[in-house]
Amino acid sequence: MANKLLQSRRQFLQKAALGGTVAGSFSLPIWAAPPQVNYAEVLPESMRLPGRGFTNYGQPSSYEKDIIRWISANQDAPGNGVSWAPLHDLQGTITPNGLHFERHHNGVPDIDPANHQFLIDGLVNTPLSFSIDALKRYPQQSKICFIECGGNSNSGWRSTPSQAAAGYAHGLVSNAEWTGVPIKLLLHEAGIQAEAKWAIVEAADGASLNVSIPLDKLLDDAILALYQNGERLRPENGYPLRLVLPGWEGIVNVKWLRQLRLTDKPVMSRNETAQYTELMPGGKARQFSFIMEAKSLITSPSLGMQLPDNPGIYQVSGLAWSGRGKISRVEVSADGGQSWVKANLQQPVMDRAFTRFSLPWQWQGQYAVLQSRATDETGYVQPSREELTTKRGTDGFFHYNAIVSWEVTEQGDINHVYGF
Amino acid sequence: MANKLLQSRRQFLQKAALGGTVAGSFSLPIWAAPPQVNYAEVLPESMRLPGRGFTNYGQPSSYEKDIIRWISANQDAPGNGVSWAPLHDLQGTITPNGLHFERHHNGVPDIDPANHQFLIDGLVNTPLSFSIDALKRYPQQSKICFIECGGNSNSGWRSTPSQAAAGYAHGLVSNAEWTGVPIKLLLHEAGIQAEAKWAIVEAADGASLNVSIPLDKLLDDAILALYQNGERLRPENGYPLRLVLPGWEGIVNVKWLRQLRLTDKPVMSRNETAQYTELMPGGKARQFSFIMEAKSLITSPSLGMQLPDNPGIYQVSGLAWSGRGKISRVEVSADGGQSWVKANLQQPVMDRAFTRFSLPWQWQGQYAVLQSRATDETGYVQPSREELTTKRGTDGFFHYNAIVSWEVTEQGDINHVYGF
């Protein structure tokens, strides 16, 4: 039955494209309820006066002042915490720089790029030091990809469903165009010694954050990012220099990058032992679980939104992504997973980037449970919460990627529910 | 000769990818001149202190405060003018929202979305009026594409070459992800009458800006944009609603969209008669020249930059775009067009979007004239300035897309020159 209520968007748009015949094949209004034009209304005030002048650097409209990153920080160490991107208020696939999620361990350092040096040493033939200006002379490449904190969605491990808005539960992930120097060029310039297998990467922040990264990833597709969505990195995203490892958890996309030391083994730092590991049912922990598995989330309609008292066709829309490659399929269910319909994927679908999916949905005031399920090009299918907790237990904190269920009541309220 | 100095980037990266052998095949330093690491230097100050806390909406680094849109406005009507995107300071392909170019005829109106209505009337079966909330319920699509002012680069028509920076001469073009409702859905809902051939589109700004648009374009790929790079439109880019016509000149991408009236002929408004037409050699003018033809621009190195006294390999990088589809080829010359080498195109190359091209260049202190030439998938080749002025005369103001020549002196100064 839910199947009948979910329409293939392609099918719908094909019908719509038939033009004249559409008025016959749909009763107006199709979606919303546009009133007839009221010609009595006067011209808007904005047409009676000149508007404001130009700006050197623009800002959002004051009417959008509530579209913000939601902050959760340590009261005693305000630079230690996170801020979530409001995915439920965004559309498309690019995350604007002002709303890209943050995760800091000891705040955002103030680094003068004129004084910043990036060092490569350890198991290399020639240790090298690069100024930002020197790096800008190298070839640069761009990659539109997501970066997701390993701890994103961790409220999912709790025994009761969090009732935070979609972005404020799952928005420790953002998608941007990162541009910079392929680090393999610099490593080859320094000369990689045969015993080198890992790199110990250190940030110039107040946490002296450091992690270990397999050399193979650095030689594959790692970028020394200088630019984010066209402009220089934002301070909270690593200005003046950030390591970007497409598809890998946020912590290894080291911000405020200062040093890369080639070694034969990992350093076993706090952020790969005490943190960013997953406690398994047997009591052992998964470690170096770098890759973010396929995941999806319906952003509209989602928790906190109220469906108006106005039955008809609604657009179900959301985001899917995978650290292993392209999203190949997203299915949507309106009956808690009993039946699934393939959603439309916004083109072009890009490797390890946000993919927007959407599907028209007939809501006639019935109770419904909306879910989305992503499959990536490796064939990996996003698990249900039951499948995930069966495999990984319930003591986890990181790498939660289970299907999210939004309950829609007959009144049009939307809640987060488990058990589907 | 210049041919030998320009290397295929693919070739270079393949070499670099060979790893160990590279140190042998290149003498260090390949690009810049990284000094040996100085281990005497102390830890950066930023590692000694906690950094600042989180922000609800981020801003650029204070060290980037000079990366701005350059404003040129009418002293007596400050809302009438332009601001250029600083393309010479940007990288990648996305233009961040704060730096997207502006062109206003009477300033930026302050429009409360709660009160804004979009009207469809004229030759339709049922005139309709939509609130912003009603529009948000419709299916939305995204398109990453450029928008270019018809007057971009118009200093090229002058008899002497302008010496403004690349972005401040050619930056009335920007590239963003626009998301909104395909307008054909709404037109079909209103019911298009047989005689309808054009739409008269009006803005809610202080200029009451209006233009005529062929109905076919609206039924093809026109988007009623609500979102720009993921967040709601910026005020200067049409908040709360903008018409986006991929590949067509900026003026018809109507901002602060208020009304669309279907008609059987164009309205012949000021902006399609007195303005946004091209005076031809015979004294007649081209009108309704909507499509922006293929164009390219080297952004680095470019005017105002100084090549350091440090010969070696430099990266030549720039942007190419076409209103007719995908860029199929960009060639770069270092000898004023005597010889050309194919540049690398950043993937994925998108339809009617910025395409970043790049190529390594050997500069040994020789005099050079750098040029780029774009070809799009229709086979259209960007003209030289001589070809363009021979065809269009020298009295033009709009639609200037000729090849740009940057002269590099033996001292590493870069100037804009004609005659190549």
Image: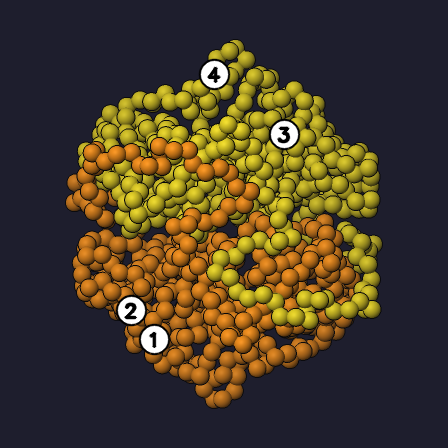
Chain colours: A orange, B yellow
Using the rendered image, report if marks 4 and 1 lie on a common chain.
no
Using the rendered image, report if marks 2 and 1 lie on a common chain.
yes
State which tag comes first along the sequence, 4 or 3.
4
Whole-Å distance between the Cαs marked 4 and 3? 23 Å
Q: Is residue B12 left or right of residue A59?
A: right
Residue holding disc 4: B285
Q: Which of A217 and A283 is in front in this view?
A: A283
Residue A161 circle label: 1
- Are the residues flagged by discs 2 and 4 in contact, CB closer than 8 Å? no
Q: Please report, as a chain letter, where disc 3 is located.
A: B
Residue found 58% across the figure and 38% down from its top: B70
Task: From the top left corner, tell me how far across and down residue B198 is, in percent.
Answer: 32, 27
Q: In this view, does A62 lie to the left or right of A73?
A: left
Q: Which of A51 and B125 is in front in this view?
A: A51
- Are the residues flagged by discs 2 and 1 in contact, CB closer than 8 Å? yes
Residue holding disc 2: A415
| Of the two numbered discs 2 and 3 in the rendering, the one whose residue sits closer to the viewer | 2
